[in-house]
Amino acid sequence: MRNDFAFLNVEIAQRVAAVTIDNPPINIVTLPLYAELMQLIEALQKEPELSVVVFKSAHPDFFLAHFDVEAILQFPTDGDAERSAELNPFHLMCERLRTMDKVTIAQIEGRVGGGGSELVASMDMRFGVIGQTVVNQMEVPLGILPGGGGTQRLPRLVGRGRAMEIILGAQDLDAETAERWGYLNRIYAPGDIDQAVTELAQRIARFPLPAVRLAKASVNAAELPLAQGLQEEAYLFARLLRTSQAQHAMQKFMAMGGQTHDGEMRVADLVDEVMRSGE
């Protein structure tokens, strides 16, 4: 996969892609950066052996500040606003992150706002840093609204009332509150996040690729009515049960101490050892 981007650095090792965003001084989502993000995300979606993608920033104070307001001021305003039957390009990019058969993780060590926040809200997991990570949706005071999916994704992440507070209040959301509300999965002390996210990404990447991909697909089906979601879960489970990876992993699990007292007391480590034994 290409790695000649001007604002993105991509490193791939052992089924994990680490993407570092670098658009100084504050990682504004300018049109050139936006174009590269669209190209990269489309390319990542097509990578057959990739399991996990981690997005991080080269700038400690900013993950992604927000979409370029100067660019928004150039958007066409002639005629009446019309509803489109198709998703716009930004929405399509975010949906690729949400639905691609790779696990997407945001490692947010500084501020993330506006369209940057909407981008990470479409990812599978978000991790932050105590005292450093800050979330802000600053659109409404500027006379607009979060137009990159924020009004749809935030209620799904944090609930309707809290999404209203984030969007209408346009106040900084600190790391501790963002974690408590469910925007961030976890928060870490400064200096600890890189190792924690890297270890999680590498752990997931060791697991059987079909299981990781279909588990994500099954979780995405939770947005369907419950009965349909359960039917999809049963179907995907049945598909995985028929794979050689599942049969071999379950056999090794039993042989290495699964379903014994000692084995089950350390089951998280045991299943990792099962995967490591096949490397």
Image (spheres, rainbow, N blue to C red):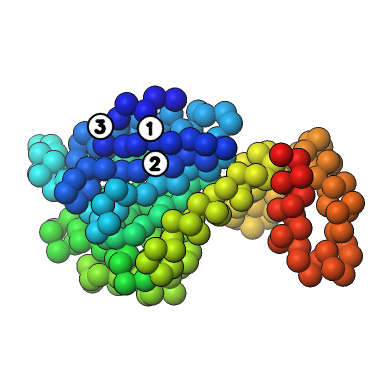
Q: Do the residues labelled 2 and 1 touch (CB within 8 Å)?
A: yes
Q: Could you tell me which residue is drawn at 30 percent across and 30 percent down?
A: 5
**117 left or right, relative to 48:** left
Element under disc 2: strand
Which residue is labeled 3 in the image? 6
Give 105 or 81, whichever is nearer the viewer.
Answer: 105
**Who's the residue at 72% across and 46% down the image?**
276
Image quarter for residue 36?
top left
Residue 117, picture quadrant: bottom left
Residue 16 lies left or right of residue 40; in this view the side is right
N-terminal of the pair, mark 3 or mark 1, is 3
Q: Is residue 234 above or below residue 151?
A: above
Return the x and y of residue 164 as percentages of the image width and height.
Answer: 32, 69
Residue 158 placement (x, y as % from top left): 43, 67
Q: Which amino acid does label 2 sit on?
A: Val
Which of discs 2 and 1 lies nearer the camera? The answer is: 2
Q: For the residue labelled by badge 3, is the local secondary structure a helix, a strand or a loop?
A: loop
Q: Mark 1 points at which residue?
A: 40
Label whose residue precedes the other's in the sequence (3 or 2)? 3
Q: How crowded is mark 1: few (under 14 residues within 10 Å), some or many (20 or more)?
A: some
Q: Can residue 98 be seen in this view?
A: no
Q: Do the residues labelled 3 and 2 touch (CB within 8 Å)?
A: no
CB-based contact (under 8 Å), mark 3 and mark 1 = no
Distance from the alpha carbon under mark 3 to that under mark 1: 12 Å
Quarter of the figure that contains the C terminus: top right
How many other residues sit within 10 Å of disc 3, few (<14), some (14-19) or many (≥20)?
Answer: few
Badge 1 amino acid: Leu
What is the C-alpha distance between the residues marked 3 and 2? 12 Å
Which of label 3 and label 1 is nearer to you? 3
Q: Which amino acid does label 3 sit on?
A: Ala
